[in-house]
Image (spheres, rainbow, N blue to C red):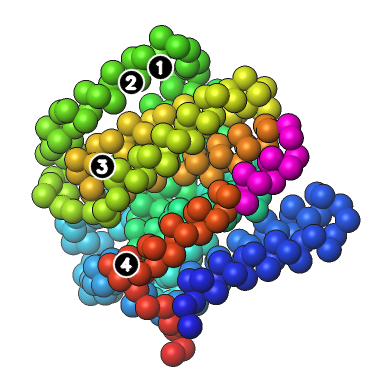
Amino acid sequence: MNWYLTNLLIVIIIGLLSLLFRSEDTRRKFFLYGSFIQLFLFLSLRATDVGIDLPNYFYFYDKCNQVGWNTIFSYRYEPLYIIYTKLIANFINNKQIFLVITAFLSLMGPLYIIKKYSKNYFLSIFLFITFQFFTYDFYLLRQVIAMSILLLSLKYVEEKKFVKFAIMVGIATCFHTSAFLFVIVYWLSKLEIDSKKLLIITGCMIGILLFGDRIINLVLNIVYQHYVGSTGEEGGYFYFIVLLFVFLITTLLKKAFLRQQKTNQIWYNILILAMFIQLFAIKKPIISRATIYYSIALIIVLPNVIKCIKDKNLRMLINLLVCVGFFLFYLTRLGNENIYMTYHFFWQ
């Protein structure tokens, strides 16, 4: 049995069950919390070897039990992740509980943004699973905790409280260094994109395609030498095309999209930033891991822009086509054993 598909099927069933409620608000809450409980359980109940990077994380976890506080900070991990792991290892000393706590922390951010900003909970969660954001929770432990914190920090971008936002970004950076770049979202969120800026964006993208490899090697040498020469997930062009397609559709419906809610401007600009970073990932696949901080905007932007379509029948058709398209993509990725290790429960 393919448990990854079963997980998706259960989420769809929860969506169908939510239709039994008369109140739209009740339907939305039932589906949102029901599906996230399912995702939490699916992450938490997996065996400790289900996740391509878990051996490295658990090697460090074991070290946390073997060495003292004065030595543990000599390891290459970020300070808050070191403290987080050592506290769990020393006081609980159960790898399964470590996965449970990490699962909860990694899902808090996505749950928050979908509840607060999405106009279509079902499509947002469907995209969260099928476009592989949920998959990262299985093996990019430090990074998904950092991403969750960054998503929670968007509240302070909306409220224009830079100090609180910067503190949240700082906390996220202490779980994964790559999170520090997210600070630019505060200023980019205020930027209104007009035709002139679109031309500048196009020019910059061409420049990245020509010189992106040189730029990213320079940045990695300065910021994170550990990843110089590393590889990452393939499919950089495809991810960029998806982001570009969503960006173009959103730009065509931009007026209605921005009128829908003020915060859509923030998500629109984050999506543009995701395209820029994904272009670097074409040159250096490991950068695709940094793209997730920004490309997750897709799970808000796409459902919201589809909601802007006035024709109800056309809107339903597009929702269906999007679900079918991303489901087929998900099927193709499930065969990648470097990402989707055979799922089994911790008691098996």
Q: Which residue is mark 3?
A: 281
Report the residue that reaches farthest toward the bottom: 348
Frontmost residue, 87 versus 21: 21
Element under disc 1: helix
Tell me whether the residue at label 1 lies in contact with that at label 2, contact meaning CB atoms closer than 8 angstroms. Answer: yes
Q: Secondary structure at mark 2?
A: helix
Q: Which mark is residue 110?
A: none
Q: Is residue 46 visible?
A: yes
> Mark 2, residues whose alpha carbon is within 10 Å: few (<14), some, or many (≥20)?
few
Assess disc 3: are there few (<14), some (14-19) or many (≥20) residues with their C-alpha within 10 Å of its C-alpha. Answer: many
Relative to 113, 93 lies left or right = left
- In the rendered structure, which disc, 1 or 4, sits on the residue that comes first in sequence? 1
Amino acid type at mark 3: Ala
Lower position in the chain sequence, tag 4 or tag 3? 3
- Distance Cα–Cα, label 4 vs label 2: 33 Å
* Residue located beneath label 1 in the image: 198
Judging by the rendered image, the residue that carries numbered circle 2 is 202
Kind of residue indicated by mark 2: Thr
Span highlighted in magenta in the image: 310-320
Query: Please, what is the dominant secondary structure of the magenta stretch?
Result: helix
